[in-house]
Image (cartoon, rainbow, N blue to C red):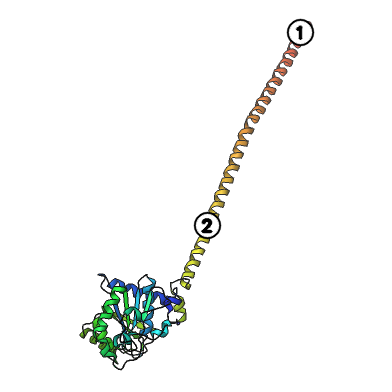
Amino acid sequence: MKKELIAELDPKSPISEVFRTLRTNIQFMNTKGKLKTILVTSTFPGEGKSWVASNLAVTFAQAGKKVVIIDADMRKGRQYSIFGVSPIPGLSNYLSGIGIDEDEELDIVDFVQETEVDNLFIIPAGNIPPNPSELLISPQMVDLLDQLKELCDIVILDGTPNELVTDSLILARLVDSTVIVTASKETKKENLRRAITNIQNVGGKIAGVVVNKVPIAAKKYEQSYYYGSTEMKKAKNEMRNAMKKSNKQRLTSTENRNTNRTKNIEKRDNETRENKDRPDLENNIKIKKENNEATLERTNDILKQINEYLDKEKKNIE
């Protein structure tokens, strides 16, 4: 298995998420459940057709679908090298019978190989035939797709670039839908427009166009939202700072409440102390008042005695 299978080797990467988005978009197109065969093609070689086809197949398999990927580029197929399987027997051997014993009955299962990815199987391109286009228009090709539809959930065909040969145009008539892979700043608009027109002219349906090789800066790549990205870390840090600020405010509020509670307690204690001391003060005033009254009464008695004594002396003199 090569590093090209990013969806399998690094399923948490942003690129893998892009392939899952592509899978989801195709599934939403399959509202009636009739989309089971998908052709992946391009305008010219080198636009990433085989890479997109293989990773798209992996994402379907990861979703629990039983998937078969067919390397339908019998001129220059490379899916066997991506998945690390034997290049033969393959599609050309099934369609032509080359390398198969005459007495042996053709069974599609004999041409299907397992991959290291769960639920994902592959039919490699096989031996390079002299007439690939003629093999694709044979009844055996139609029978092959019909059998695989019964055995699997999704069949993905890695076709040829349709600007060079007609193989993909033939397959576009047989499959349920076609995905065209283009390369950013490489694929010309007129070539893409011609490819779309040619597929539609033969009765093929187009699911959409995938733009590959889009240049992305390393900083922007790291800012992907998915799984441990810098944006996620930034959001976590902001959340952590907000929680710290909230906790600090809560602590300050608690301290203020405790301070106010302490002041209220001290105020109550002072009032209690004052209330407690007030009766003693009143008693002291009462005692002092009583002492003053006793002193005044004693003084009056003395004055009375003096007056009586003076009156008595006055009578004696007379």
Whole-Å distance between the Cαs marked 2 and 1? 93 Å
Q: Is residue 183 left or right of residue 281?
A: left
Tell me which corner region of the image, top left, top right, bottom left or bottom right, holds residue 18.
Answer: bottom left
- Report which residue position mark 1 lands on: 312
Q: Is residue 96 left or right of residue 252?
A: left
Secondary structure at badge 1 equals helix
Q: Amino acid under label 2?
A: Gln
Tally the marks.
2
Picture coordinates of residue 39, whole percent (x, y) = 30, 81
Secondary structure at badge 2 equals helix
Q: Amino acid under label 1?
A: Lys
Picture coordinates of residue 290, whole percent (x, y) = 67, 22
Q: Nearer the viewer, residue 4 or 151?
A: 151
Picture coordinates of residue 44, whole percent (x, y) = 33, 90
Q: Nearer the viewer, residue 8 or 193?
A: 8
**Mark 2 vs 1, N-terminal side:** 2
Q: What residue sits 49% from the left and 70% below the top?
A: 233
Q: Is residue 82 left or right of residue 318?
A: left
Bin the neighbour count of mark 1 within 10 Å (Cα to Cα): few under 14, some 14-19, many 20 and up: few
Q: Where is the C terminus found, in terms of image quarters?
A: top right
Q: What residue sits 67% from the left and 28% below the top?
A: 284
- Report which residue position mark 2 lands on: 249
Residue at the outermost bottom position: 130
Disc number placed over residue 157 in the picture, else none: none
Q: Is residue 105 left or right of residue 221?
A: left
Residue at the outermost front position: 103
Picture coordinates of residue 232, whole percent (x, y) = 46, 70
Q: Nearer the viewer, residue 170 or 301?
A: 170
Q: Where is the N terminus found, in terms of image quarters?
A: bottom left
69 w.r.t. 259: above or below: below
Say whether residue 235 is visible: yes
